[in-house]
């Protein structure tokens, strides 16, 4: 396997058919930018989780919903990447790889990423977000890969489908397991060594997602039929979406109940308002089903210009992630120094459409340095640190 492909959250290059995986990864990275523009320039209109449809405008609701696919698909692809890596390495080597990469991500979240979000170090509050979560999931997967595939599949399904049964369970600070449970499932703010932390991404449901990504790996084994794989992914995706609609209509399990408001727009918003922190069964079911459909389409149309552009973003995911956060923070600091606050303590866009205009401009501008870095990494395989980005 190429050393460049032994990279963080990446895919070994077994041929052009895997360009589709890079393209899907790049696509969700790009879509993620929409929400991060919102979190930078639209904080005066906070959204709850799940989104309150009575206080959130439709345009803001659907802008928020657009990026819902990012974390589930990205973590599922991380599990898939681990399986592909394991096809050229022993289980012990794969486990060691996952622990090293996972630890690096945790460290990255606690240092560079929190600095880019806060603009100072140490921040007033360490938000333990998606990079931290992916790192812990990789470390968990390092042990889970030694289980039989069928057992791992069962564990993944039980976690993703069954964890909502724990929604009513919580621990307080007096419990010796409080910090562990806060990391696993209970969003909390806690103090540790005089620093304040927020477990924004409880990791337990995501461990189920990364496990499901790993057991999907054989779909991409050498010699597998691309036609059969596309058909399987498309079928799983459509069936998953139908199952989501059926369970959501029953309205008794898998997420917060939706409300019939007697007005179609708000009723539909309530139906689609799903819990991300931690991700509910219905959140992951709907988003992973869409992800499979998109992956099938990216593979079928992998030679199109759109797929090729997205694959450039997917070839350097950590570089793009850090770069876009730095650019957003810099833009906000410069704009705030010039104009000052426009809504309370925030400098805010006057409407949602500015989020989308900024998103499109940034995608265009960030494509060129991301493509340059991906090509630079490919041309300099001997530089070991590049594989982390």
Image (tube, rainbow, N blue to C red):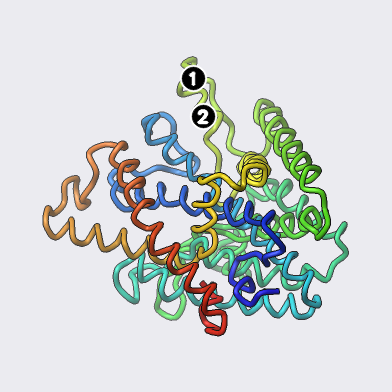
Q: Residues within 10 Å of mark 2 (few under 14, many from 20)?
A: many
Decide: marks 2, 1 in contact (CB < 8 A)? yes
To which quarter of the image does residue 378 belong?
Answer: bottom right
To which quarter of the image does residue 185 belong?
Answer: bottom right
Q: CA distance from mark 2 to mark 1?
A: 9 Å
Q: Mark 2 or mark 1: name the one nearer the start of the chain.
A: 1
Q: Which residue is mark 1?
A: 261
Residue ID at (54%, 63%): 315
For residue 49, side relative to residue 356 (left or right): right
Residue ID at (77%, 73%): 88
Residue ID at (78%, 76%): 89
Q: Residues within 10 Å of mark 1 (few under 14, many from 20)?
A: few
User: Looking at the image, which is closer to me, 273 or 176?
Assistant: 273
Q: Secondary structure at mark 1?
A: loop
For residue 59, side relative to residue 338 (left or right): right
Q: Which residue is mark 2?
A: 270
């Amino acid at each position: 396997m190429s050393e460049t492909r032994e990279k963080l959250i990446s895919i070994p290059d077994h041929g052009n058919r895997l360009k589709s995986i890079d393209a899907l990864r790049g696509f969700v990275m790009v879509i993620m930018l929409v929400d991060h523009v919102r979190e930078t320039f639209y904080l005066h209109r906070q959204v709850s989780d799940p989104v309150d449809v009575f206080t959130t405008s439709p345009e803001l609701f659907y802008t928020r919903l657009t990026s819902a696919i990012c974390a589930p698909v990205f973590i599922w692809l991380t599990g898939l990447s681990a399986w592909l890596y394991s096809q050229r390495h022993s289980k012990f080597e794969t486990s060691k790889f996952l622990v090293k990469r996972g630890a690096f991500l945790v460290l990255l979240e606690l240092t560079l990423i929190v600095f880019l979000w806060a603009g100072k170090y140490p921040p007033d509050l360490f938000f333990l977000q998606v990079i931290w979560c992916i790192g812990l999931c990789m470390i968990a997967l390092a042990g889970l890969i030694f289980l039989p595939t069928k057992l791992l599949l069962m564990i993944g399904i039980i976690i993703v489908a069954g964890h909502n049964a724990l929604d009513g369970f919580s621990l307080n600070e007096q419990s010796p397991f409080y910090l562990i449970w806060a990391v696993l499932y209970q969003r909390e703010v806690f103090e540790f060594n005089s620093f304040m932390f927020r477990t924004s991404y409880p990791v337990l449901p995501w461990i189920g997602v990364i496990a499901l990504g790993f057991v999907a790996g054989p779909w991409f084994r050498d010699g597998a039929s691309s036609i059969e794989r596309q058909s399987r992914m498309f079928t799983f995706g459509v069936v998953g979406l139908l199952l989501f609609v059926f369970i959501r209509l029953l309205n008794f399990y898998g997420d917060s109940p939706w409300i019939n408001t007697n007005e179609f727009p708000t009723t539909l918003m309530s139906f689609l308002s799903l819990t991300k922190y931690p991700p509910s069964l219905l959140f992951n079911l709907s988003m992973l089903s869409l992800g499979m459909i998109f992956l099938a389409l990216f593979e079928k149309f992998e030679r199109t210009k759109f797929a090729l552009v997205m694959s450039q973003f997917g070839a350097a995911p950590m570089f793009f992630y850090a770069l876009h956060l730095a650019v957003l923070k810099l833009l906000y600091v410069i704009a705030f120094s010039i104009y000052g606050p426009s809504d309370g303590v925030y400098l805010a866009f006057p409407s949602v459409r500015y989020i989308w205009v900024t998103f499109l401009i940034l995608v265009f501008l960030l494509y060129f340095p991301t493509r340059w870095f991906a090509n630079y990494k490919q041309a300099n395989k001997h530089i070991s640190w590049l594989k982390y980005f």
